[in-house]
Amino acid sequence: MPDFADLDLKVLSRQSSHPVLGAVATSLLPRMLRGESAMAFYEDGPYQL
């Protein structure tokens, strides 16, 4: 998978010409981790938080 760690969601949410991509980026802004490693998991996967 590509590494999007340096993606600037604020810029993407403001400057995206694609309405869905802009909306998704905007909805992700409150979930940004500042200074911490990100972790992804599937809710129906074998590992739960």
Image (cartoon, helix red, strand yellow):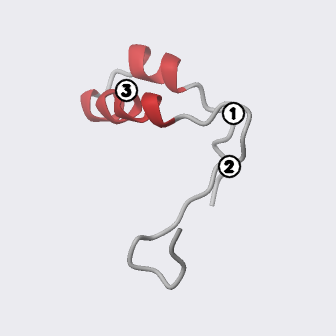
Q: Which residue is mark 3?
A: 26
Residue situated furthest bottom in the rendering:
46
Q: Amino acid at mark 2?
A: Asp
Q: Secondary structure at mark 2?
A: loop
Left or right, 2 with respect to 35, comes to: left
Q: Looking at the image, which residue sits at the far left? A: 19
Q: Residue at x 34, y 21 (%)?
A: 17
Pointer 2 or 3: first along the chain: 2
Rendered location of residue 48, percent (x, y): 50, 74
Disc 2 residue crowd, few under 14, some 14–19, many 20+, Cα 10 Å? few
Viewer-proximal residue among 36 and 18:
36
- What is the C-alpha distance between the residues marked 2 and 1? 8 Å
Is residue 24 depicted above or below 44 in this figure? Answer: above
Q: Tell me which label, 3 or 1, sits earlier in the chain.
A: 1
The residue under the point 46% across, 80% down is 45
In the rendered image, the vertical position of residue 16 relative to residue 6, given as above or below: above
Mark 2–mark 1 CB contact (< 8 Å): yes
Question: Foreground mark, 2 or 3?
Answer: 3
Mark 1 residue element: loop
Q: CA distance from mark 2 to mark 3?
A: 19 Å
Residue that label 1 marks: 6
The residue positioned 62% from the left and 56% from the top of the image is 39
Q: Type of residue at label 3?
A: Thr
The image position of residue 6, as x and y in percent, is 69, 33
Q: Where is mark 2, residue-wise?
A: 3
Residue 20 vs residue 32, the one in the foreground: 32
In which quarter of the view is residue 29 placed?
Answer: top left
Viewer-nearest residue: 37 or 15: 37
Quarter of the image where one finds residue 28 = top left
In which quadrant of the rendered view does residue 25 lie?
Answer: top left
Q: Closer to us: mark 3 or mark 1?
A: 3
